[in-house]
Amino acid sequence: MPVRITALVDPDGGTSGRRLAWLASGTDGAPVGSAFLRLFSRPGQNHLAELELHVHPAERRRRTGSLLLRAAVAAARDDGRRSVITQAEDGSPGEEFLAARDFRRVLTLTFTRLALDDADTGALNEIIGRPHPGYRLASWAGTVPDELAGTFVRSRRAMDDMPMGGTDFGTVTWDLERVREAAAAVEKRGDLLHTTVAIDEADGEIAGFTELVVPGDGEGDAQHYGTGVLPEHRGRGLGLWMKAASIREARERYPRLGGLLTDTADNNPYMRHINDLLGYTPTHTTHEYQLDL
């Protein structure tokens, strides 16, 4: 069955990039697949495009995916991009599809979940209660308070050396506008952002942070976002301390919440160890693929 590829107008924009979209449809007009291409625009990542491609299972191996991919890659080249990245779950048809089209595997992510009903409250309290001389915990909901805004922006460099394997990810530069924009995006879709930080009592600077996004109705599963500790404060157990405090707060605030989700690069043993200690269990594995243009 011939497939028609139609470029669409995607309203999903923002200061960090824009998104292109294509719809694949059959002769009867029924949709059979789609592709979205995120073109990052901020300095440090304006060489990069991120692809999301879906084909209805019944339409696979009928060139639908190839036609969508061709349109997206052409758009990335026309825009002067150097790399296109995308993901495929381990063992999925997407892996074979990407490998046959010159994408190479550059990173492996293990996804895990902590069922809150199974969380060991005693162990959490013991971790949170351990002394961390010279540091204290603080937390907030939504956008960072004005009095902590400057130091929170500075603490974002804790993610600069996040293990990314061979991904041509570039550098992410954070300023106050971007921090507030990220919090506003979570609020706009109806979710709740919670941030827990460790503060160095010597100078009042944030030494590390962890973020959790909770569904707006307080049900289902929440999603961990970034967790990072500044290099000069590592080796003191702050990551485990902050994450345990975040878990306990989530349980107390949202008694109907089912679990917490996170994903960790396989070449990040430190964070994987933290998740293991806190009781997270693997759910699936996804691989990051990259096409060099």
Image: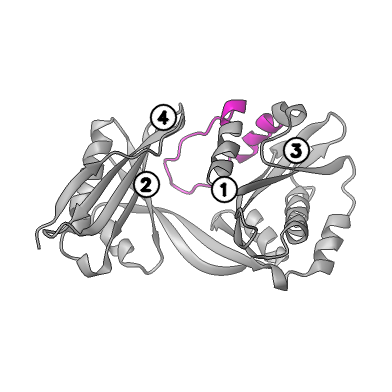
- Number of the label disc, if any, that sits on residue 101: none
Residue 155, located in which quarter of the rendered image?
top right
The image shows residue 47 at horizontal and vertical percentages of 37, 32
2 or 1: mark nearer the eye? 1
Q: Is residue 278 left or right of residue 112?
A: right
> How was the colour assigned to the protein in this rendering?
one colour
Question: How far, Cα to Cα, is label 2 from label 3?
Answer: 31 Å
Residue contact at pointers 4 and 2, CB within 8 angstroms: no
Residue 167 is covered by the magenta coloring: yes
Label 2 sits on residue = 85
Question: How far, Cα to Cα, is label 4 from label 1?
Answer: 25 Å
Question: How far, Cα to Cα, is label 3 from label 1?
Answer: 29 Å
Label 1 sits on residue = 190
Label 3 sits on residue = 207
Mark toward the start of the polypeptide (4 vs 1): 4
Q: For the view shown, which residue lies furthest in the bottom direction?
A: 118
Residue 202 is covered by the magenta coloring: no
- For mark 4, does the 10 Å Cα neighbourhood hold few (<14), some (14 to 19), or many (20 or more) residues? some
Q: Secondary structure at mark 1?
A: loop
